[in-house]
Image (spheres, rainbow, N blue to C red):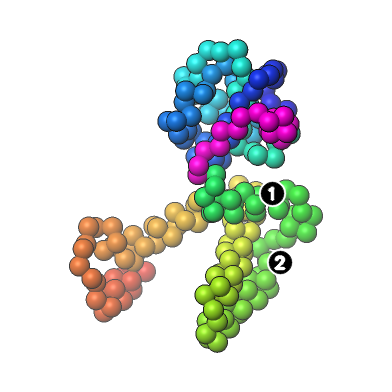
Amino acid sequence: MPTGSIMEPMTVLLLDARWPTLIPFQFVPKLKGQVVYTDEVPVTVRWDFGDCVAPGEDTLLVSTDEHAEAVQDARARGEEILEVPSRHEAMGQAIRTMERALHLGEWEQLQTHATLVSYLEEETAELKEVIEQGGSDEQLCNELADVLLQVLFHAEIADRRGAFDLNDVAAAFVAKLQKRAPYLFDGTTEVVSADEQVRLWEEGKLR
């Protein structure tokens, strides 16, 4: 249940769980009234939120979970829903879908990194087959989506044990490229030769 009592009329602000402190400027004039939160909203967001909200008689429900009961009830009543645009970005939707899959699916909850290895091998083999057989762009896209599912799945399992999340995986990718392809980050504007790329890559692997 959200913190505080809820009264009508209500406005719902749906934040992006990846960046819960980012609120579009156009939403600010509508942020007014008594603020209540669904349980998952970080404490740090609650601390800072008061400075953004004007006094008013209405209720402002702040959430990062579109499936929260209070959000669903408000939607059913036809209350105004302010949803930050980044929530509609496909990668964010994919992450939330994977989170929900592990929350609701018993099969998903039973999986480990080890039990998923065979699925990763299967999906990688299918991707390889589509590429080698000259499959269509649609087939290639679908097979890449299956491989992405595996990445999302492993990252979510790791996140649930407090090890790392998909953002950490992305950060590791960038850190690796900073070492092995420094020309991507140092302002280089000319095309880098393949020989130089190989040299830098091998050199970066030693760091």
Asked whether residue 18 appears in the rendered view, the answer is no
Could you say whether the residue bearing mark 2 is in a helix, strand or loop? loop
On the image, the x and y values in percent for residue 67 come to 70, 40
Asked if 185 appears above or below 35 in the picture, the reply is below
Q: Is residue 78 magenta?
A: yes
- Earlier in the chain: of badge 2 and badge 1, it is 1
The number of numbered discs placed on residues in the rendered structure image is: 2
Asked if 101 appears above or below 67 in the picture, the reply is below
Residue placed most toward the observer, 72 or 151 = 72
Q: Quadrant of residue 177?
A: bottom left
Numbered mark located on residue 100 in the image = 1
187 vs 160, left or right, is: left
Q: Amino acid at mark 2?
A: Thr
Q: Amino acid at mark 1?
A: Arg
Asked whether residue 16 appears in the rendered view, the answer is yes
Q: Quadrant of the C terminus?
A: bottom left
- At 57% across and 16% down in the image, what residue appears? 33
Q: Quadrant of residue 110?
A: bottom right
Foreground disc of the pair 2, 1:
1
82 vs 76, left or right, is: left
Numbered mark located on residue 118 in the image = none
CA distance separating discs 2 and 1: 19 Å
**Magenta span of residues:** 71-86
- At 47% across and 56% down in the image, what residue appears? 170
On the image, the x and y values in percent for residue 191 come to 23, 71
Q: Residues within 10 Å of mark 2 (few under 14, many from 20)?
A: few
Q: Is residue 77 magenta?
A: yes
On the image, the x and y values in percent for residue 97 come to 65, 52
Residue extending farthest to the bottom is 133
Q: On the image, numbered disc 2 is attached to which residue?
A: 115
